[in-house]
Amino acid sequence: NRADNTDRLRMLENQLQSPSKDRQFILVNYDMFRNPQFQRLLEMYPMDVTVVDEAHNVKSRFLQSVKSELERPSAKSGPAKRTLGLYSFITSHPDMSVFFATSTPFVKDLVEPLIMAHLVNPKKVPTEKVEQMMYDAVSTNQALREVMIRRRKEEIIDLPAKETRFIPIDL
């Protein structure tokens, strides 16, 4: 809802304008990166660290399409606006630390985790390297090990077994 977003952005801006002795943390939905008003706030109040949760949503199968769309926006189908907004934000703040988090398996094409690795550490995984490795599983795996920590569920938590129940609902 556009009104809800406007109210949220107004509240966020008020918080950012209030000087605080403590560090400020901002939690926002990934979709906010396509909002021009939110993008303006990000420019006015630079971030030292950005943590992107649900990072499996940050993808574009063709890195060149992201770069081309940023250089020459078009009405044609291309990367999601939120992906473009996030990509633009991260790449325009090279001194900002970036962390991606996801608990969802996301690899359909090798380029997807490479784009995430590029956004997290563009010096270790530059665009040219992404383009070279996007069809080579061994090189991709080696590059990802330099910028990614992977933990399997069984390594970090003891979860109860999944349970499936059938619950009839009268309509």
Image (cartoon, rainbow, N blue to C red):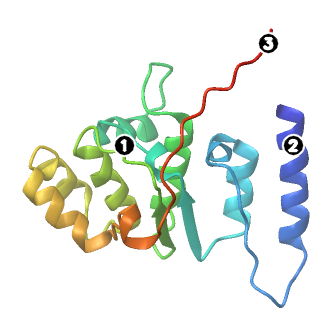
Q: Look at the numbered discs 2 and 3 and tell me whether their residues touch, using CB distance below 8 Å.
A: no
Query: Amino acid under label 2?
Result: Thr
Q: Earlier in the sequence, mark 1 or mark 2?
A: 2
Residue assigned mark 1: 67
Distance of mark 2 from mark 3, alpha carbons? 40 Å
Image-based side of 135 in relation to 29, left or right: left
Numbered disc 2: secondary structure = helix
Image-based side of 22 in relation to 62, left or right: right
Image-based side of 149 in relation to 18, left or right: left
Numbered disc 3: secondary structure = loop
Say few, some or many: other residues with alpha carbon within 10 Å of mark 2 (under 14 / 14 to 19 / 20 or more): some
Measured as percent of width and height from the top left, residue 38 is found at 73, 51
Q: Quadrant of the C terminus?
A: top right
In the displayed image of the protein, which residue is found farthest to the bottom? 21
Looking at the picture, tell me which residue is in the foreground, 162 or 131. 162
Residue assigned mark 2: 6
Residue assigned mark 3: 170
